Amino acid sequence: MATLDLTKSLLYRWRYIVGYTVIGLLLAGLLIFAGLYVPGGISPEEMAATVRSNSVSPTDITTWGITSLPYYMLQEAIFHTFGVYDFTIKLPSLILALLSAIGLILLLRRWFKPNIAVLASAIAITTGQFLFVAQNGNPGIMYIFWPIVLLLLGTQVTRGKRLRFLWKILFAISAALSLYTPLSIYPLLAIGIVTLLHPHLRHALRRLNKLKLATCVVIFAAFLAPLIFNIVRDPYLGALLLGYPSSGVLDIGANLMTILKQYFIFWEPSTTTLMTPVFGLGSVLLLGLGLYRLIRTRETTRSYLIITWILCLIPVLIVNPNFTSVIFVPSVLLIAAGLTSLITYWYRLFPRNPYARIAGLIPLVILVVVLIGSGLDRYIYGYHYDPNTSVNFSKDLKLIPKGTERLVVSKEELAFYTVVAKHRNSLKVSEQPTGDTFVATRKAKGEFTGYTVDRIITTTYTNDSDRLYGYKKLPQ
């Protein structure tokens, strides 16, 4: 019987193009779907981010003393261009999520075999955690974006053959800007430790041109100078960037229990703003297998870096377990390592039998499809249909009727809707009614002397579905 030669088949030769095309279409569809429909509203954190973005002035360095400054500057630029709407609030995160996904695919291709990169990328972009931070209009996406950028540029610096000085400059700029985001110092710390400990990286560091290296240091310092200035003005900013809880409360026992629920209590999922556990059981098993593989191959640069990075993050997560997104990139790399172990083990059992290799791919494909399907299922049904979760996201902004000129809000809502009105010339926001007609939010509704309710604008929610009230002045 003739031996089956898979390499000559059309599907085999085009497999990666087909795979990445599917991933690209899936990613684009999911980001649009998440930005427009799921969860379908904005959270209190997104409203706070909108207010904070409005407080940043490009010409006043004293307003830059906030964490995640690059994100807020991008968000404010989008507001200035397109106005403040549900989608524009989320647009910075959607853009950065798209860039993060592309960067992650490129990183996985550089670190792992192409087949592993395709499978791990598909799992990563369909996890509920990635999709949630991708549509969430606050700086949570930066915890994923910066590590991917730093690792990808760092790989280009050590392995790239062309434009190496350009990659060094881009790495210096990215490293400086990343430090404006909390916990971004730890990937850089891991890179620094591994560079000093690993012989290959030490050799690469010694080979760097001293003049070019000094130029990169100067560029790094220039982009970091505003942050240093504001940390000197407010040292607490430095503590926040290191991961100290903003509440100032430190309870190690409670934090350990929170971490346990976030990652390992699969039989008691919680539904707050962030659904837990963060990863499904199948993904966690792959994580464990990947960690085992990295320990077995700890002499490689890749294993050195990931293990060191995780060790740097563990104390920070114990101090502040709310930073769940910072573990996303290391987790994806561990999943990729776990997939590598599975495929390598199967191929080692049947090194020359093409039929056995094909048969071995079937359960692996089923595993990946199940992980993708379960990730999408948890995200869509959890954030859109779960009554305990969906009510955390407000649709009030998109429910404001077109042509509304006066909006009455509560004291707590005033700051957010003032920013909205700033970018809508026809809208005026206040805490007390004026004019013949106005619209009031649910928190601001009441018995206004001389006015009567003309209409009620509702949502499809079972509870608290009355969102906006239209008033008109009573005839004299």
Image (spheres, rainbow, N blue to C red):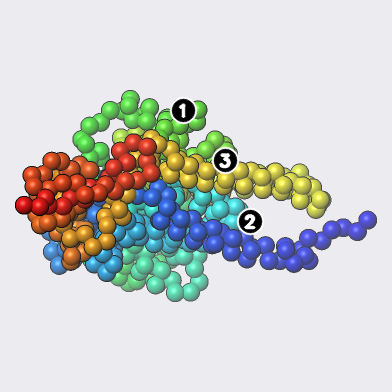
In this rendering, the label closer to the viewer, 2 or 1: 1
Relative to the observer, which residue lies in front, 210 or 278? 278
Residue at position x 44%, y 74% in the image: 163
Outermost residue toward the top in this view: 253
- Could you tell me how many numbered marks the image carries? 3
Determine if residue 117 is in view: yes
Q: Quadrant of residue 6?
A: bottom right
Amino acid of disc 1: Glu
Q: Position of residue 276 (x, y in %)?
A: 43, 36
**Residue at disc 2, secondary structure:** helix
Relative to the observer, which residue lies in front, 180 or 163? 180
Residue designated by label 1: 268
Q: CA distance from mark 2 to mark 1?
A: 34 Å
Which badge, 2 or 1, is on the more N-terminal residue? 2
In this picture, is 58 found above or below 146?
below
Residue designated by label 2: 115
Residue at position x 35%, y 49% in the image: 41
Q: Quadrant of residue 114?
A: bottom right
Q: Position of residue 183 (x, y in %)?
A: 32, 47
Q: CA distance from mark 3 to mark 1?
A: 21 Å
Q: Position of residue 364 (x, y in %)?
A: 67, 45
Relative to the observer, which residue lies in front, 96 or 78? 78
Counting other residues with Cα less than 10 Å from the Cα at mark 3, is it few (<14), some (14-19), or many (20 or more)?
Answer: many
Residue at position x 38%, y 44% in the image: 460
Amino acid of disc 2: Asn
Residue 286, numbered label: 3
